Amino acid sequence: MTEFRIEKDSMGQMQVPAAMLYGAQTARAVANFPVSGLRFPRPFVRALALIKKNAAAVNGELGLVEAAIADAVQKAAAEAMEGVLDDHFVLDIFQTGSGTSTNMNANEVIANRARQLAAGGARIHPNDHVNFGQSSNDVIPTAANMAAACEIRYALIPALFEMQEALGEKAQAFDDVVKIGRTHLQDATPVRMGQVFSGYARQTALSIRRIEEAKEGLRELPLGGTAVGTGINTHPEFARRVIARIASDTGIEFREAVNHFEAQGARDSLVFASGALKACACSLFKIANDIRLLGSGPRCGIGELLIPPVQPGSSIMPGKVNPVMSESLIQVCAQVIGNDAAVAIGGLSGNFELNVMIPVMIHNVLQSIALLANAVRLFTGRCLRGLEVDRERCAQLVEQSLMLATPLAPVIGYDRAAEVAKEAYQKRRTIRELVREQGILDEGRLNEVLDLRAMTEPGVSSQG
């Protein structure tokens, strides 16, 4: 049976599992919010602990917290940063909208662990020492910005750069392959496979640019505003010094918010970041879906791309191989787009001096970043790197296309070219065959007009 100890807070006594480092306030939140089983992810816990570590250091420097206590708090917070204390961060995402419960969870765990580490069993209080000069209202949104910015920089952006590089390599490798273009899901004029992949590479590059721009907004930290943005109960130097330490530890140039009332009353920077992630998901969905469709078949579909086989595709159809890496990525994109809707609704809830949907916004943004980073990395390594083009299939399809009538129009007129296209369709002949048989153009002029490569190069005229 679980053993308990008695802990006290301002509301009275609470039973707390003896093995847990948290205290009465966390225990109340455990009882109040058994909603989903979802916990704050590791990057957020690390960011929160990093704030506590550097806050203790600055409070010690300023003489606001006794040096021995500040030192013990720093050591305990460092353990929390490293994940040693993760089992003691137990609260559900769906809790008080300010994240006060989780801030107190951190304060209690770090205080109790610091007490264990301190020589002589020093009295270390979660509010009076660990939370000194802080409020949940500035700490939680600060940790949210920190965690999102760090995960964008160190996980998502590298994954997207790798994908952009792989797409660029394929654009070069496939540049000699002319294929049929498609608009409205119907045949259109020719395009080079390399040009198609250059478009994908550019989409990825622009996604990186948008996400980088969003990361810039996350660099402004609300720390120092305390309860409502006025900075009550905090030292004038506290926020600047703590944020300078955080910037040094993370390698990201975080800075104090220009206006603390904006930084705490609104979560617009997180909404903007989520929007950039959604835009990225839309781009990735197109890329993955195009590759999936271009590789359909392999014999009875489009079949222009040869997708690397990574696992059997069916429990009943022997030899079937499916585009599973594309399917995984597009599912991730769907989730990210859904997450953004929750973040947007959260952003609407900046009621007066505080947004009260911060935990669910944190959860969705960090999940989106993690999902995209992981899925992009896997898609690049297990699909893009091994992707090949079926040159014979591309040549076959482009030659059969009725849209080869398009470069005929400036030479023989639009109406006559349309008649040729319709007749070719009805007789199941190619445009080239029909023009040759009917003597519409001599062989030299026909080859000049139906030069497939020239059709894909801007500025090259088929009229000679």
Image (cartoon, grey):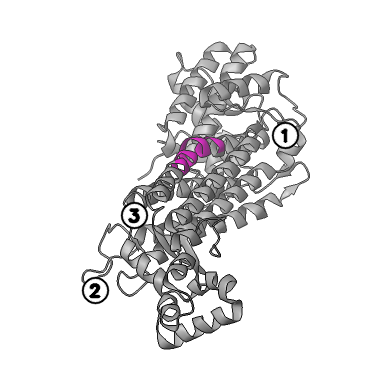
- Marks 1 and 2, how far apart in space? 62 Å
Q: Is residue 100 visible?
A: no
**Residue at the location (62% across, 17% down)?**
59
Q: Earlier in the sequence, mark 3 or mark 2?
A: 2
Q: Are marks 1 and 2 in contact (CB under 8 Å)?
A: no
Gap in angstroms between the C-alphas marked 3 and 1: 54 Å
Secondary element under disc 1, as helix, strand or loop, is loop
Dominant SS of magenta comes to helix
The quadrant the N terminus occupies is top left
Q: Secondary structure at mark 2?
A: loop
Q: For the magenta stretch, what is the residue range?
A: 149-161
Give the labeled residue for mark 1.
227
The foreground one among 296 and 157 is 296
Q: Which residue is mark 2?
A: 317
Q: Is residue 392 above or below residue 247?
A: below
> Which residue is the extreme one toward the bottom?
426
Q: Which residue is mark 3?
A: 387
Marks 3 and 2, how far apart in space? 23 Å
Q: Position of residue 99 (x, y in %)?
A: 61, 42
First of labels 3, 1 by sequence position = 1
Q: Amino acid at mark 3?
A: Leu
